[in-house]
Amino acid sequence: MDATHRVRNDGRVDLPEQQPAPADPSRFRASDADRDRVADQLREALAEGRLSPEEHAERIELVYSAKTYAELAPALEDLPVTVAPSAAPTVAAPQDLPAPPHEPAGIVAIFSGAERKGRWLVEPHTNVFTMFGGVELDFREAVLTQREVTINITCIFGGVDIKVPPGVRVIDSGMAIFGGRSIAGGDPDDPNAPVIRLTGFTLFGGVDVKRRAPKGEQGDFRERLREQRDQIRQRRDERRDHLRELRQARRRDRRER
């Protein structure tokens, strides 16, 4: 009998433990930085003539409405892996999508500080404990493993600062004793928006949640989409003027002849 199936003295059989299936990276939530990287590659493709202005506008709209890596991938599926030399990674096919490295699900700061920022993977449940210390959580470029994640915070004589991007709903289910919990307003109306749920308690401490746009981002998605369309119209006008000048030059040549 296989070594993984052992028969006990009482006649029962020990079956191998079922390992949980690995998470599909294509279902991870895409960050604003991921969308910006894809938009940059589409701009390069437009400049090189790989995309028409109409195709570029359609794909940009797709990119800024995408919520997961799987929804981002079609925007680049028929373009070269690297449209132009760039240090920013491209969005690969769903099966090859890179996932951020796994971080411990627990964050502890005692008489010290701890932080999670940049591109990091947010597990379904994260425990935060701080005593006479501080913790900073920046979700602006974070990748959520599922639509709703829970952050359980125990804050004693300390502070926890949280930054979330626009479009993320924050639900505070925790309590404060001789402390405070401040949650910025502006929750999105979209019922399918990602959710960060805060639980736990605060004793002589504070939890502060602020909404901040990602670094380097100007305006929201709609504003950036309008800027993209304005650039396309400007290029069209420049091409139209150039063609008009060519026609006029040809007419002058014919008259001179």
Image: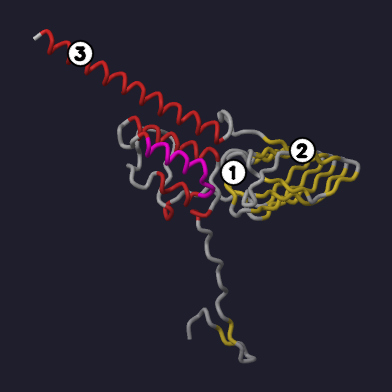
Q: Secondary structure at mark 2?
A: strand
Image coords of residue 17 (percent x, y): 57, 74
Q: Which region shows up in magenta?
A: 54-68
**Vertical side of 117 occupied by 216: above or below:** above
Reading the image, the residue beneath label 2 is 208
Closer-to-camera residue (199/133): 199
Closer-to-camera residue (248/238): 248
Q: Amino acid at mark 2?
A: Asp
Distance from disc 3 to disc 2, alpha carbons, whole Å, reads 65 Å
What residue do we see at 71% from left, 39% from top?
186
Reading the image, the residue beneath label 1 is 142
Image coords of residue 54 (percent x, y): 37, 37
Reading the image, the residue beneath label 3 is 249
Farthest-out residue, top: 256
- Asked if the stretch drawn in magenta spans residue 139, the answer is no
**N-terminal label among 1 and 3:** 1
Mark 1 or 3: the one toward you:
3
Quarter that holds the C terminus: top left
Q: Quadrant of residue 60?
A: top left
Q: Secondary structure at mark 1?
A: loop
What residue do we see at 40% from left, 32% from top?
43
| Mark 2 Cα-neighbour bin, 10 Å: few <14, some 14–19, many ≥20 | some
Q: Amino acid at mark 1?
A: Ala
In this image, 56 relative to 154: left or right?
left
**Vertical side of 215 occupied by 128: above or below:** below
Q: Secondary structure at mark 3?
A: helix
Q: Quadrant of residue 217?
A: top right
Image coords of residue 145 (percent x, y): 58, 53
